[in-house]
Image (cartoon, rainbow, N blue to C red):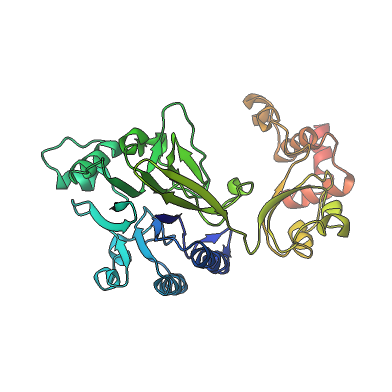
Amino acid sequence: MKLLHLADLHIGKTVNGFSMIEEQRHVFRQVIGYIQKERPNAVLIAGDVYDRAVPGVEAVRVFDDFLTELSHEDVTVLLISGNHDSPERLSYASRLLSDKRIHLCGAFDGTLRTVTLTDEYGEVNFRLLPFIKPASVREMFAEREIESYGDALAAALESASIDYTARNVLVSHQFFTKAGENPVRSESELNPVGGLDAINAELVSRFDYVALGHLHGAQTVGYEHIRYAGSPIKYSFSEWRQEKSVSLAELREKGGITVTKLPLTPLRDMREIKGELDILTSEEISSQADKEDYLRVILTDEKEIIDPMGKLRGVYPNVMVLDFENSRTSIDLGTVSADSEKAGSLSPYDLFSEFFHEVSGTVMSGEQMAIVRELLEIPLGAQETEDEG
């Protein structure tokens, strides 16, 4: 049985002011292409379908188009909600859609929803577990002590009385970890303080395959059969080196599984470039990659630049982030100012002069002095008079 596993679609997401809608349409077309080529029996979508609980009109339209295309293929769709989704909105028309082999599981109601498919080796039981929190699960299992996310997951699984001698697949959207391993995290994820939402992957190790959502980098968690598909698009510059993909898992007899990553090509890549403005904007450098890519630019120029973003976007229209890295930005500002007693005795002009000298390593020019005096409304010659006094 072939399973196509994807997650963290975040339809409708905006990154640094840029809408990702066209990027999402582009990768969804590739997903449909893989379905038509690989002919999987099921598509597993492990949560965070939308980027926010109340998605915009265009995001809903994109998801509707994607589901409609999936319904035209000979494939069963198994979809759960993630922590970004509204369970109720995602479950809309779920009973009607199940007749189309599209199974939407928005909320956990105390019963682990199961969908069973059959292949030449027998039955495969798919357990659909949307994102859960201890507080909500505690209300459903009053007889149990549920304090942590691990407690909540254990309660949900034990309530289903799963027969692990059969083949079982879990679709879940939680933060799973393995002792001694550090998962790859991304800035585009929601990271609770102290990892309070972490769940030991041992709890789900007896499943034949665990299709996870939540982390945006594709990775395994302690075992080859427990894995995050990762997001299909780079949603932050912490992900710019990642190669995005969907996972194709093939289940055979009990215990037999292979997993292959199918690459996804972005409409516009996300990358970083670093150097001086004139060099980065030269044809020699800018022509080495797609100028339409989403960029984080790090300028190393020592001289002041007027309108650097405007100059960059004249060559690279999709610059998202502009940073500077030079001798001024590398100075430890904690050592710049004098002690508090000395600072209190200096005039605003003297404080700025000292700061300028420490940061730039030079004294202000006459033109710069005049500008500072004008901004501080110090009459010309007043500084000299104060010094003489």
Q: Nearer the viewer, residue 370 or 99?
A: 99
Residue 38 position, x and y percent, is 50, 61
Horizontal side of 114 relative to 41 (left or right) equals left
Q: Is residue 373 shown above or below 34? A: above
Whether residue 130 is visible, yes or no, is no
Q: Residue at x 27, y 57 (%)?
A: 116
Q: Nearer the viewer, residue 247 or 345?
A: 247
Quarter-of-image position of residue 179: top left
Q: Is residue 354 shown above or below 1? A: above
Whether residue 62 is visible, yes or no, is yes
Q: Nearer the viewer, residue 27 or 188?
A: 27
Name the quadrant of the N terminus: bottom left
Horizontal side of 128 relative to 270 (left or right) equals left
Horizontal side of 80 relative to 156 (left or right) equals right
List the single residue furthest toward the front. 120
Count of numbered circles on the image: 0
Horizontal side of 300 relative to 15 (left or right) equals right
Q: Is residue 31 shown above or below 190? A: below
Q: Residue at x 21, y 37 (%)?
A: 146
Residue 377 position, x and y percent, is 73, 51
Quarter-of-image position of residue 99: bottom left
Name the quadrant of the C terminus: top right
Residue 123 position, x and y percent, is 28, 53
Q: Is residue 169 shown above or below 4? A: above
Q: Residue at x 20, y 41 (%)?
A: 158
Residue 375 position, x and y percent, is 74, 52
